[in-house]
């Protein structure tokens, strides 16, 4: 199969196959429409339907559309052109959905950045994607974003504007919406094969990699998920997952317009507040990583009536215990609980289960492989497909697959000749079309659904004067799924503790989510003959330490 690199209006280069594009269009998986077309149709159908809920705030379709038209006029006034990148580092606030829609109206590329990121990650991402505009809070969770950006501006010459949301700044949200709304006949013509999102995800190479999704790929997965899970206008979705992650973004920005559901946003998660949101708004759908479900069980297990409205809960983003799904199904029998599997690159590669007759599969597998998503399990050494039931490397392809990384060099080695993407996970196919994840090839830590690159943290810690060498691996955690465990060889006659590690990483501007949470001081690290650290051995040791701590 022939693959070419196309020049996108954004300046990014994207992977393209004429043969697959023809197939996906012919089969109806790719349509020549964008979110703006879906939003306009939904607006005509029922303009007063509630689209977004955040605390006491309710935004209807009409209100959201009108705000997006005003923001689109602001984009035009700041000379933004189709293909320019607009970033936002915001919590789960309704403004994010307005930004996402307005950007689509004007053919811009959105770049969601998690609010937990600090100077180190932020400066890299904004420069790497050549962001022209950034939306950010003034102060959120006691962190002064305005001051942080003031210190970064000199190093970001392509960043023209910073708009402060829910705070005061030279440019702020109220000012951005002060212009007369743009006429929707003035929207530029947008090619659905063009890039509409650059979302950065941490991998094994240290620096985050920009995942490029087009209108085609993103729209397809939003439609496929909604159809599989029968999402409709009667559904109210409680989505605690950050809108700066792929799952949260889909539910807050696209599912509402395409399938008519309303989305409840919460900027600071607590289990008690989450249950109150579900109960007060009669939420029907919920999803998130393991910690969300565990805390939901711990808090609402004795009062199931509080979340009686839920009919569906999907769980993924990190290791999901079969026992956790089983317990949830037993505790809340009217809700369908299941595991699903995907990544930023291949969104919802599986779609869980269909009904309660498959509840066992919902706990024991990571979901059904539903065409047109294609998953294979291959021999990691040679890409030979393995028989069902045998463990191997998972590779994936489909109309929802991303169109490559922001740096084409990052694509090398990550795709086979047929365009299947190497997911970095090990697994096996069971019951003909269900996948079970058994491990990971990639050396990442998934903490509360957030990918953390050990190498990025190791590279910083290696510069500490008391550290001779360091290796960080995933350690099982009951609360976050996984956490970082740092094995450190101290310099002779020196030592280091967790308090000093936290102080040092904080001073380096690293997001606290990435800080290791357990420390083991060692005299040496296990290595292969070439000198590379045997992290599989360290992971086993970290697991033993975690198990001992729970006894």
Image: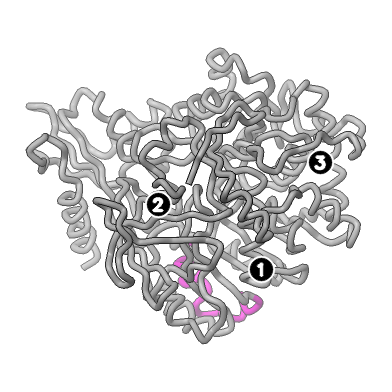
Q: How many marks?
A: 3
Residue beneath the point at 59% across and 19% down: 150
Taking the image as shown, residue 443 lies to the left or right of residue 257, namely left
**Answer yes or no: do the residues labelled 3 and 1 have beta carbons within 8 Å?**
no
The residue beneath circle 1 is 227
Q: Which of the two residues, 342 or 465, is positioned nearer the viewer here?
A: 342
For residue 504, which quarter of the picture?
Answer: top left
Q: How far from the left and from the top, in percent, is residue 354?
A: 56, 77
Q: Which residues are magenta?
A: 292-309
Q: Where 394 sits versus 179, above or below?
A: below
Tell whether 303 sits left or right of 381.
right
Q: Nearer the viewer, mark 3 or mark 1?
A: 1
Q: Quadrant of the C terminus?
A: bottom left
Q: Secondary structure at mark 1?
A: helix
| Residue contact at pointers 2 and 1, CB within 8 angstroms | no
Q: Which residue is mark 2?
A: 423
Measured as percent of width and height from the top left, residue 459 is found at 29, 29
Residue 102 pos. (x, y %): 77, 39
Looking at the image, residue 338 lies above or below residue 180: below
Q: Earlier in the sequence, mark 2 or mark 3?
A: 3
- Residue holding disc 3: 68
Q: What is the image's colouring?
A: one colour
Residue at x 67%, y 26% (from the top left corner): 133
Within 10 angstroms of label 2, few (less than 14), some, or many (20 or more) residues?
Answer: many
Q: Local crowd at mark 1 within 10 Å, few (<14), some, or many (≥20)?
A: few
Residue at (47, 30) in percent of width and height = 407
Which secondary structure dominates the residues rendered in magenta? helix
Residue in front for this viewpoint, 368 or 255: 368
């Amino acid at each position: 199969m022939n693959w070419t690199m196309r020049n996108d209006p954004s300046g990014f280069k994207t992977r393209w196959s004429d043969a697959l594009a023809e197939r996906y269009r012919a089969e109806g998986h790719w349509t020549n429409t964008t979110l703006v077309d879906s939003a306009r149709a939904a607006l005509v159908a029922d303009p007063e339907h509630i689209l977004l809920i955040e605390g006491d705030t309710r935004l209807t379709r009409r209100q959201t559309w009108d705000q997006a038209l005003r923001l689109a006029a602001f984009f035009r006034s700041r000379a933004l052109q189709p293909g320019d990148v607009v970033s936002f580092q915001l919590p789960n606030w309704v403004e994010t959905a307005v930004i996402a829609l307005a950007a689509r109206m004007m053919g811009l590329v959105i770049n969601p950045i998690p609010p937990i990121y600090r100077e180190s990650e932020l400066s890299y991402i904004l420069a790497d994607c050549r962001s022209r505009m950034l939306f950010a809070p003034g102060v959120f969770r006691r962190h002064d974003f305005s001051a942080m950006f003031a210190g970064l501006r000199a190093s970001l010459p392509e960043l023209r504007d910073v708009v402060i949301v829910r705070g005061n700044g030279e440019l702020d949200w109220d000012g951005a919406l002060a212009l007369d709304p743009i006429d929707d006949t003035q929207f530029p013509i947008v090619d659905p094969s063009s890039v509409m999102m650059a979302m950065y995800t941490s991998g094994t190479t240290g620096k985050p990699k920009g995942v490029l999704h087009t209108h085609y790929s993103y729209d397809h997965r939003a439609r496929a998920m909604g159809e599989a899970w029968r999402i409709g206008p009667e559904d109210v979705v409680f989505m605690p997952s950050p809108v700066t992650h792929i799952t949260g973004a889909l539910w807050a920005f696209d599912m509402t317009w395409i399938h008519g559901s309303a989305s409840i946003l919460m900027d600071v998660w607590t289990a008690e507040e989450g249950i109150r949101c579900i109960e007060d708004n009669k939420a029907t759908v919920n999803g998130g990583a393991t910690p969300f479900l565990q805390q939901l069980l711990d808090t609402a297990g004795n009062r199931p009536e509080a979340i009686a409205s839920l009919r569906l809960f999907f769980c993924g983003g990190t290791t999901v215990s079969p026992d956790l799904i089983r317990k949830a199904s037993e505790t809340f029998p009217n809700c369908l609980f299941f595991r699903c599997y995907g990544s930023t690159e291949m969104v919802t590669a599986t779609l869980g289960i269909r009904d309660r007759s498959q509840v066992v599969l919902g706990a024991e597998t990571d979901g059904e492989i539903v065409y047109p998503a294609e998953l294979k399990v291959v021999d990691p050494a040679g890409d030979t497909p393995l028989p069902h039931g045998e463990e191997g490397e998972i590779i994936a392809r489909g109309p929802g697959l991303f169109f490559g990384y922001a740096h084409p060099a990052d694509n090398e080695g990550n795709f086979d000749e047929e365009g299947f993407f190497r997911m970095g996970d090990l697994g096996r196919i069971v019951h003909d079309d269900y996948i079970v994840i058994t491990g990971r090839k990639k050396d990442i830590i998934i903490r509360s659904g957030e990918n953390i690159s050990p190498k990025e943290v190791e590279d910083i810690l290696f510069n500490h004067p008391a550290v001779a060498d360091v290796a960080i691996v995933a350690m099982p955690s009951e609360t976050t799924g996984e956490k970082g465990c740092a094995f450190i060889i101290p310099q002779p006659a020196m030592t280091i503790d967790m308090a000093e590690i936290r102080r040092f990483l904080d001073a380096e501007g690293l997001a606290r989510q990435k800080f290791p949470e357990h420390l083991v001081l060692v005299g040496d690290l296990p290595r292969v003959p070439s000198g590379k650290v045997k992290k599989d051995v360290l992971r086993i040791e970290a697991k033993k330490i975690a198990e001992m701590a729970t006894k």
